[in-house]
Image (cartoon, grey):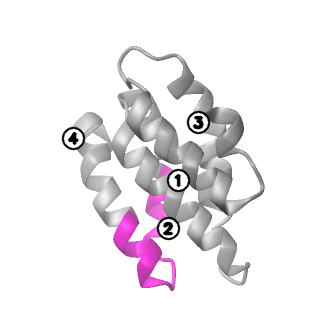
């Protein structure tokens, strides 16, 4: 799933992120830790002035993160998520806000 998640094609990414959401057990899978850098890259790809594709890729990553979040993932990705709360697009802000709820359930020290 991680290889498909890093594909440059959006359709492949979507399938990979869906497989990760459905098939990974966040508490027992070491693969979740491997996705940290990939998720960081996708979240940073949603920069202002970038292509619209980066925004939708970040949306996929945010959705996946909310389903597989662990305490370690929350600690690593919280600064990137908080930065995206100031994104000019409401699509990203809405997804980040809902994801932060799940992150804070697993990583309450982030509050």
Residue at label 3? 36
Q: Mark 2 points at which residue?
A: 84
CB contact under 8 Å: marks 4 and 1: no
Residue drawn at 50 percent across, 67 percent down: 84
- Choose the circle earlier in sequence order: 1 or 2: 1
Which residue is at the front of the view, 32 or 21?
A: 21
Q: Does the magenta stretch include residue 5?
A: no
Farthest residue toward the right? 8
For mark 3, give the secondary structure. Answer: helix
Characterize the local packing of mark 4: few (<14), some (14-19) or many (20 or more) Cα atoms within 10 angstroms: some
Of callouts 2 and 3, the N-terminal one: 3
Please rate how many residues cluster around mark 2, counting C-alpha atoms within 10 Å: few if below 14, some from 14 to 19, many from 20: many
Compared with 47, 109 (above or below) is above
Q: Which residue is drawn at 38% across and 66% down?
A: 95
Query: Helix or strand or loop: what does disc 1 sit on?
Result: helix
What's the residue at 58%, 36% (across, down)?
36
- The residue to which callout 1 is attached is 61
Label placed on residue 105: 4
């Amino acid at each position: 799933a991680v290889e498909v998640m890093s594909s440059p094609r959006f359709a492949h990414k979507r399938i990979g992120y869906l497989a990760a959401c459905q098939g990974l057990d966040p508490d027992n899978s070491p693969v979740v830790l491997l996705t940290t850098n990939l998720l960081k890259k996708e979240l940073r790809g949603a920069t202002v002035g970038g292509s619209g594709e980066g925004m939708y890729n970040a949306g996929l990553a945010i959705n996946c993160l909310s389903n597989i979040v662990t305490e370690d993932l929350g600690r690593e990705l919280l600064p990137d998520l908080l930065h995206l709360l100031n994104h000019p697009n409401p699509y990203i802000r809405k997804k980040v806000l809902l994801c932060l709820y799940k992150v804070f359930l697993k990583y309450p020290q982030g509050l």
